[in-house]
Image: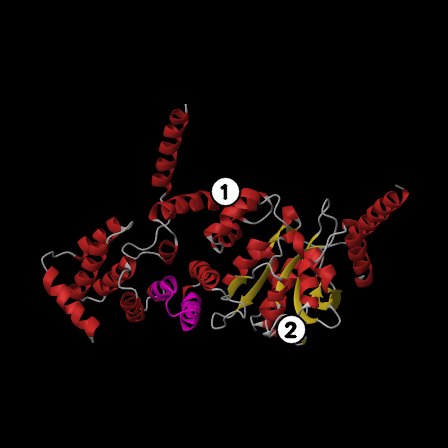
Amino acid sequence: MKNRVAGPLAAALISASLCLQPPLAQAGIVSTQDVASKSQAQADREKLEAFLDRASVKQRLEALGVASMMAKERVAALSDAEVHALAERIDSAPAGGNLSSSDLTVILLIAIVVLLVIIAV
Amino acid sequence: MTRFRLCIAGLVALLAGCAAPQTALLLERPAPGLPARAELASVPFYPQEEHQCGPAALATALGAQNVPATPESLVSEIYLPGREGSLAEELLGATRRHGLLAYTLLPQLEDVLREVAAGTPVVVLQNLSLPVAPQWHYAVAVGYDLAAGKIVLRSGRTRRELMPLADFERSWAPSGRWAMLALPPERLPATAEAARYVSAAVALERVDAAAARRAYRTALARWPDDLVAAIGEGNAAYATGDLAAAEAAYRAAALAHPESADAWNNLAQVLGELHRPADARAAALRAVALGGPRLAQYQETLQALGGPGAEQHGSIVLDKEAAK
């Protein structure tokens, strides 16, 4: 069962990677990232993952209102680990914004209510 | 507004009832070598617009390193309209796009204070609300006073927000104690760790090879034995087209780490491009002989150099050079 799924999946991934040609380092030079990773198998897997992750994060950035060109540049500035983290949780990762005063009022009200409840109990 | 926010922070702390263990430890037993107080008064301040604390905090950190940027100019680089905020990872990316090294600190309050004491403002991510309805906020730590138990932040519309360290720690803990520095590649963080710093430089290399080259050099000045930094310096020089510098860096890496096939392979590649086929083949043969997980790549390098049969000659040349 496992093989029935894994086989086609691997084939799809491999053909995807062949068609899309993930950007590799210049021929001949071993990239710094490869030198830093523990094994070549790990490096290859990470490269493929990062390639797929980058595409999905770029798509999510666009869906969240970033212009396409800018989304591409923004994704390019992230390390593989960062892209991977965002691919998994771009919709739930902390997004530092602002507290508008209406937000603060709501929070204060909730806080007071909770405090009252605690005291009452 | 500030008092309002502090009042909320106090209430939240009261309700959450959570402790601030690092603050307690720090105030109880001062860390050796940590000044009792420090403040970076000259760090610029950009009062934030609605939802724009990310751009404001980043502009503050970049401005402190004399990199001109305004919150408005950074909005298109890090603001995410659909989330009404900015993601921490994107602050790191934007820092690199401005030619600075983005270094995330270990999740330790003491390290934040150490960096401030060493002259670097620290961007921090806080949750100013309850865990159930988080309000994520970026601020920049620019000072502290251990005797008073306070931290000084550039935050929101307040130039100099004085926050009790314990309240700060409680608001900072929910982000996993996220803190980052934006540093010129020549400057090592006061709390720098080799692996952390070098991987920050590897990330910079993706965006700005020239800046990364300086960062690798900074790393090597402190950790001369770091193989990744040694090859990284060569790769960054290679990427900027400075083949002579790349050769020198790879050669230094190969001599310091003769067991590194990667160093020999890259040396071979650059020597080939410098039209020194005999030396190039000798280096490539060293890489192939050492083997390892990237053997196929070394063999390709050797094949691309062409002309087998120079084996003996090549290694003699190289050994002579190594002996020099």
For badge 1, the amino acid type reads: Ser
The reply, left or right, for residue B228 in relation to residue B76 is: left
Instruction: From the image, tell me which residue sits under label 1.
Output: A56
Residue extending farthest to the front is B29
Where disc 2 sits, the SS reads loop
* Range drawn in magenta: B210-236
Q: Nearer the viewer, residue A11 or B288?
A: B288
Can residue B253 be found in the magenta stretch? no
SS of the residue under disc 1 = helix
Chain under numbered label 2: B
Mark whose residue sits in front, 2 or 1:
2
Q: Can the viewer see residue B46?
A: no
- Report the residue at 77% width, 56% height from top: B9
Give me the chain letter of mark 1: A
Task: Return the x and y of residue B133 as percentages of the image width and height.
Answer: 73, 45
Q: Position of residue B102 (x, y in %)?
A: 52, 62
Q: Quadrant of the C terminus of chain B?
A: bottom left
B162 and B207: which is toward the camera: B162
Q: Residue at x 57, y 58 (%)?
A: B91
State if disc 1 and disc 2 touch (CB < 8 Å).
Answer: no
How many residues crowd around disc 1 within 10 Å: few (fewer than 14), some, or many (20 or more)? Answer: some
Quarter location, residue B172: bottom right
The quadrant in which the N terminus of chain B is found is bottom right
| Residue at mark 2 | B43
B148 left or right of B234 in image: right
Q: Identify the amino acid type marked 2.
A: Val
Please tell me if label 2 and label 1 are on a single chain.
no
